Amino acid sequence: MARIITIVNQKGGVGKTTTTINLASALAIFEKKTLLIDFDPQGNSSSGIGLEKSNPNVYEALIGKAELVEIIKTSPILKQLDVATSNVDLSGAEIELVKEYSREYKLKTILESVQADYDYILIDCPPSLGLLTVNALTACTDVIIPIQCEYYALEGVSQLLTTIRLIKNGLNPDLNIMGVLLTLYDRRLNLSRQVAKEVRRYFQEQVFNTIIHRSVKLSEAPSFGKSIFHYDIKSPGSISYLELAKEVMAR
C-alpha cells in the first residue's frame, strides 16, 4: 500500500508546489510508482508537470461525479508518475462539502481505490487550513512541512502543528510528521543561516538533512511544464531533490 504524503504549509511562497512536483518526479526516477494529487484550486502542480487543467479532474472525483482512476493522467515525461489534476472548480468543493456526511474523509475514501497501485502518493495542498487541507491531512500517512529560510519563517507554524495534532487525535491517529524541509535557502545571507539554525533547534531530528537552495532554475522550470530534472538535470536543485527523495525513501 502506498505511503501517502501531504506537503503542507498554510503560508504561500514556501516552495510547497515546487517540492511536490520535484519530489514526485524524483521518486518516479527511482522507479517508485508515484501519484501526484493536485489538491490546490490554483492547479499549479498540474501545469508545472506539463498537464492541462482540464475536466474531469480531482474535483469531480471528490464530489462523486467520477471515479479517481478515470481522472488520473500519466506524466508526459515520466511513465512512473501519474497525476490527478485540478483547476479552479476545486475551490467550490469546500462550500459543497460542508453539508456532506463525513466530509473530512472524502479524499481518504477516493484514495482507497488506488492506494494499492502506487508506492507513493503525494498531495499538494492549498495555502490554507480549510476543508481541503483537513481532507489531505486526514487521508495521509505522513506530512512534509516546507519552511522558507526567510523572515517570519516560523510564523503560523504553531497553528499548523496544532491542526495536525487535532487531526491526529480526532480523525487520523496514524498521522506522522515525516520531516521539515528547509527551502529558499541562500548561503550568502546571514538570515538564511539564522532561520535554519532556529528551525533545527525547534524541530531537531525532524528536519531533513537536505536543504533546498534558492534557485532561478527551480523557479523557471514550472513555467515550461517541466520538473527540474527535465529542465536542467545538472542544476543544484536537481541534485537536492534526488537527495530528498532518498531521505524520504529511507524514512
Image (cartoon, grey):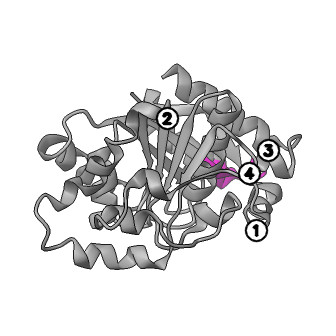
- 3 and 4 marks in contact (CB < 8 Å): yes
Q: Is residue 128 left or right of residue 216?
A: left
| Nearer-the-camera pick, 216 or 72 | 72
Magenta part of the chain: 183-192
- 3 and 1 marks in contact (CB < 8 Å): no
- 4 and 2 marks in contact (CB < 8 Å): no
What residue is shown at x 82% (from left), y 48% (from top)? 230
Inter-mark Cα distance, 4 to 2: 17 Å
Measured along the vertical axis of the image, is residue 169 above or below residue 17?
A: above
What residue is shown with label 2? 120
What residue is shown with label 1? 223
Q: Residues within 10 Å of mark 1 (few under 14, many from 20)?
A: some
Describe the element under mark 3 as helix, strand or loop: helix
What residue is shown with label 3? 229
What residue is shown at x 57% (from left), y 66% (from top)? 13
Residue 117 seen: yes
Say if the magenta span includes residue 209.
no
Which three-letter amino acid code belongs to the residue tagged 1? Answer: Ser
What residue is shown with label 4? 227
| Nearer-the-camera pick, 243 or 98 | 98
Number of residue marks? 4
Q: Is residue 101 left or right of residue 151?
A: left
Describe the element under mark 2 as helix, strand or loop: strand
Say whether disc 4 or disc 2 marks the residue closer to the N-terminus.
Answer: 2
